[in-house]
Amino acid sequence: MTSEAQHWYEMAAKNGSIYAMIQLGRKSDDLCNKLENLPASTETPAAWLTNAKNLTLAKANDGDAESSYLMYEITLDDQCLEKSANAGYPLAQYWMAVNERQGEGFFLIPGKREASVKRWLMLSSEGGNPKAMMDYLEILYAEGDMESVAAGLKWQLPPGAKPQSAITAPISRTLQTKLATHYNWLKVTHSFHC
């Protein structure tokens, strides 16, 4: 996190942004912080996470799906993630799929893990999560379900575009995001400037 990013995160956090509080709460693990290139924060990372938890807990206990996901981000308690996913929060559903794909959870019967991952990705895709859409389409492609893949690729078309113009359509937002994410990953992993 750069000093400019820290400034804006703190401004957002002071205005009630839970997401900003979580980022500031994780600042102690940040490479720039370890290199001691950041100015002192107005609060400690633990205080930011405590503030975020205090603001989020009541809504999460009332069953709010996004608040349950935020509690997962704050506490890293998998039960909060599962509660949020079961309540229909697409980002939580995506992370349930990722966690299960990486071996979390207990599945006794062969094939149940893959079926659960597919189900979470389908639900998250239906909720509009672009990463889940791409992962779900990849599973459908591997299964040979080309009809569903073709239908799913229509999600990627710009509004108003006809399916036959998909090849010449402008680059999709999903692809733009993936490219930007990859570019930022390259920048971060190959540069230590803060």
Image (cartoon, rainbow, N blue to C red):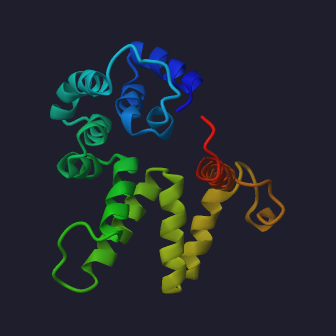
Q: Nearer the viewer, residue 7 or 142?
A: 7
Q: In this view, does 33 lie to the left or right of 76?
A: right
Q: Residue at x 32, y 37 (%)?
A: 66
Q: Which of 81 and 22 is in front in this view?
A: 22
Residue sitting farthest toward the right: 168
Q: In this view, does 60 lie above or below 98?
A: above
x, y percent for residue 79: 18, 50
x, y percent for residue 167: 80, 66
Q: Is residue 146 above or below residue 40?
A: below
Q: How many marks?
A: 0
x, y percent for residue 187: 66, 48
Which quarter shows the C terminus? top right
Q: In this view, does 23 lie to the left or right of 77?
A: right
Q: Nearer the viewer, residue 37 or 132?
A: 37
Q: Residue at x 55, y 64 (%)?
A: 134
Q: Is residue 182 left or right of residue 83?
A: right
Residue sitting farthest toward the front: 35
Q: Is residue 108 left or right of residue 134?
A: left
Q: Is residue 138 above or below residue 80?
A: below
Task: Place residue 123 in its image quadrant.
Answer: bottom left
x, y percent for residue 24: 40, 28
Q: Which residue is drawn at 65% across and 58% down?
A: 156
